[in-house]
Amino acid sequence: KVCLKEIFAFKEKGLSDQGNVRGEFVVYKYVPKVYDRMKRREIFDRNKLLSGVLKACHKRPVDPEMIVNEVEQDIYNSMRNEITTSEIGELVMMKLKEHDQVAYVRFASVYRQFKDINTFMDELNKLLSK
Protein backbone atom coordinates (compact mmCIF):
# COMPACT_ATOMS: atom_id res chain seq x y z
CA LYS A 1 0.00 0.00 0.00
CA VAL A 2 1.56 3.28 -1.10
CA CYS A 3 0.37 6.75 -0.20
CA LEU A 4 -0.68 9.13 -2.93
CA LYS A 5 1.06 12.47 -2.80
CA GLU A 6 0.23 14.11 -6.05
CA ILE A 7 -1.86 13.46 -9.05
CA PHE A 8 -0.40 14.88 -12.19
CA ALA A 9 -3.03 15.26 -14.81
CA PHE A 10 -1.52 15.57 -18.20
CA LYS A 11 -4.20 15.76 -20.80
CA GLU A 12 -3.30 15.38 -24.38
CA LYS A 13 -6.10 16.95 -26.31
CA GLY A 14 -6.27 16.31 -30.00
CA LEU A 15 -9.64 17.53 -31.14
CA SER A 16 -11.45 15.68 -33.86
CA ASP A 17 -13.86 17.26 -36.29
CA GLN A 18 -16.67 16.87 -33.76
CA GLY A 19 -14.64 18.57 -31.01
CA ASN A 20 -14.26 15.36 -28.96
CA VAL A 21 -11.12 14.62 -27.05
CA ARG A 22 -9.22 11.77 -28.71
CA GLY A 23 -6.85 10.94 -25.89
CA GLU A 24 -6.57 11.70 -22.22
CA PHE A 25 -4.52 10.05 -19.51
CA VAL A 26 -3.54 10.66 -15.91
CA VAL A 27 -0.18 9.76 -14.38
CA TYR A 28 -0.10 9.02 -10.64
CA LYS A 29 3.03 9.68 -8.65
CA TYR A 30 3.31 7.83 -5.35
CA VAL A 31 5.58 9.19 -2.65
CA PRO A 32 6.23 7.47 0.67
CA LYS A 33 5.84 9.17 4.02
CA VAL A 34 8.95 9.68 6.11
CA TYR A 35 8.88 9.49 9.87
CA ASP A 36 11.52 10.36 12.41
CA ARG A 37 12.40 9.14 15.89
CA MET A 38 9.60 11.25 17.35
CA LYS A 39 7.16 9.48 14.98
CA ARG A 40 6.39 12.72 13.12
CA ARG A 41 5.34 11.96 9.58
CA GLU A 42 5.76 14.02 6.45
CA ILE A 43 5.91 13.47 2.72
CA PHE A 44 9.35 12.55 1.37
CA ASP A 45 11.15 15.77 0.42
CA ARG A 46 13.98 15.33 -2.06
CA ASN A 47 15.24 18.87 -1.40
CA LYS A 48 15.86 18.13 2.29
CA LEU A 49 17.88 15.09 1.32
CA LEU A 50 19.81 17.04 -1.30
CA SER A 51 20.63 19.79 1.20
CA GLY A 52 22.40 17.37 3.55
CA VAL A 53 24.22 15.58 0.76
CA LEU A 54 25.37 18.88 -0.78
CA LYS A 55 27.05 19.82 2.51
CA ALA A 56 28.81 16.47 2.76
CA CYS A 57 29.99 16.62 -0.86
CA HIS A 58 31.14 20.25 -0.82
CA LYS A 59 34.40 20.55 -2.80
CA ARG A 60 34.55 16.77 -3.25
CA PRO A 61 34.79 14.89 -6.58
CA VAL A 62 31.34 13.36 -6.21
CA ASP A 63 28.04 14.49 -7.71
CA PRO A 64 25.48 15.08 -4.93
CA GLU A 65 22.63 14.84 -7.46
CA MET A 66 23.78 11.35 -8.42
CA ILE A 67 23.83 10.24 -4.76
CA VAL A 68 20.36 11.67 -4.13
CA ASN A 69 19.03 10.11 -7.34
CA GLU A 70 20.33 6.69 -6.28
CA VAL A 71 18.87 6.99 -2.78
CA GLU A 72 15.57 8.29 -4.12
CA GLN A 73 15.40 5.42 -6.62
CA ASP A 74 16.03 2.89 -3.83
CA ILE A 75 13.24 4.46 -1.77
CA TYR A 76 10.75 4.40 -4.64
CA ASN A 77 11.76 0.87 -5.69
CA SER A 78 11.03 -0.39 -2.19
CA MET A 79 7.35 0.50 -2.79
CA ARG A 80 6.91 1.04 0.94
CA ASN A 81 4.26 3.32 2.35
CA GLU A 82 6.57 4.64 5.07
CA ILE A 83 10.30 4.84 5.63
CA THR A 84 12.24 6.12 8.61
CA THR A 85 14.76 8.93 8.52
CA SER A 86 17.27 6.42 9.92
CA GLU A 87 16.80 4.14 6.92
CA ILE A 88 17.26 7.08 4.56
CA GLY A 89 20.39 8.16 6.44
CA GLU A 90 21.84 4.65 6.21
CA LEU A 91 21.11 4.55 2.46
CA VAL A 92 22.90 7.88 2.00
CA MET A 93 25.90 6.72 4.00
CA MET A 94 26.10 3.49 2.02
CA LYS A 95 26.07 5.41 -1.29
CA LEU A 96 28.59 8.00 -0.08
CA LYS A 97 30.90 5.28 1.23
CA GLU A 98 30.93 3.71 -2.25
CA HIS A 99 31.74 7.00 -4.00
CA ASP A 100 33.79 9.19 -1.63
CA GLN A 101 35.01 8.33 1.86
CA VAL A 102 35.57 11.95 2.93
CA ALA A 103 31.99 12.87 2.03
CA TYR A 104 30.88 9.74 3.86
CA VAL A 105 32.70 10.76 7.07
CA ARG A 106 31.34 14.31 6.81
CA PHE A 107 27.78 13.03 6.47
CA ALA A 108 28.22 10.38 9.17
CA SER A 109 29.63 12.88 11.66
CA VAL A 110 26.46 14.96 11.46
CA TYR A 111 24.02 12.09 10.95
CA ARG A 112 25.39 9.97 13.79
CA GLN A 113 26.00 13.06 15.94
CA PHE A 114 29.58 12.35 16.89
CA LYS A 115 30.01 13.77 20.39
CA ASP A 116 33.78 13.88 20.52
CA ILE A 117 36.97 13.17 18.60
CA ASN A 118 37.11 9.56 19.88
CA THR A 119 33.78 8.73 18.23
CA PHE A 120 35.03 10.37 15.06
CA MET A 121 38.28 8.37 15.21
CA ASP A 122 36.38 5.13 15.78
CA GLU A 123 34.48 5.69 12.54
CA LEU A 124 37.71 6.55 10.69
CA ASN A 125 39.38 3.41 12.03
CA LYS A 126 36.45 1.27 10.83
CA LEU A 127 36.83 2.83 7.41
CA LEU A 128 40.60 2.31 7.32
CA SER A 129 40.40 -1.31 8.45
CA LYS A 130 38.31 -2.32 5.43
Image: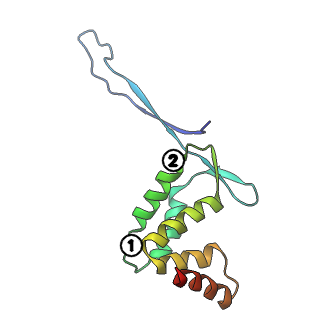
Q: Callout 2: 10 Å neighbours few (<14), some, many (20+)? A: some
Q: Nearer the viewer, residue 65 or 19?
A: 65
Q: Callout 1: 10 Å neighbours few (<14), some, many (20+)? A: some
At horizontal 40% and vertical 81% (from top left) the residue drawn is: 59
At horizontal 27% and vertical 21% (from top left) the residue drawn is: 14
Dot 1 or dot 2: first in sequence order is 1
Residue 48 placement (x, y as % from top left): 55, 62
Task: Please identify the quarter of the rendering in which residue 38 is found.
Answer: bottom right
Q: Among all residues in the image, which is located at the extreme bottom? A: 117
Give, as a three-letter code, the residue at label 1: Val
Q: How many marks?
A: 2
Give the residue pinned by disc 2: 76
* Rendered view: 65 above or below 22: below
Between the residue at mark 1 and the residue at mark 2, the CA separation in whole angstroms equals 23 Å
Q: Which mark is residue 23?
A: none
State the quadrant of the N terminus.
Answer: top right
* Rendered view: 80 above or below 51: above
Give the residue pinned by disc 1: 62
At horizontal 44% and vertical 76% (from top left) the residue drawn is: 100
- Asked which secondary structure carries label 2, the reply is helix
Give, as a three-letter code, the residue at label 2: Tyr
Q: Among all residues in the image, which is located at the extreme left? A: 17
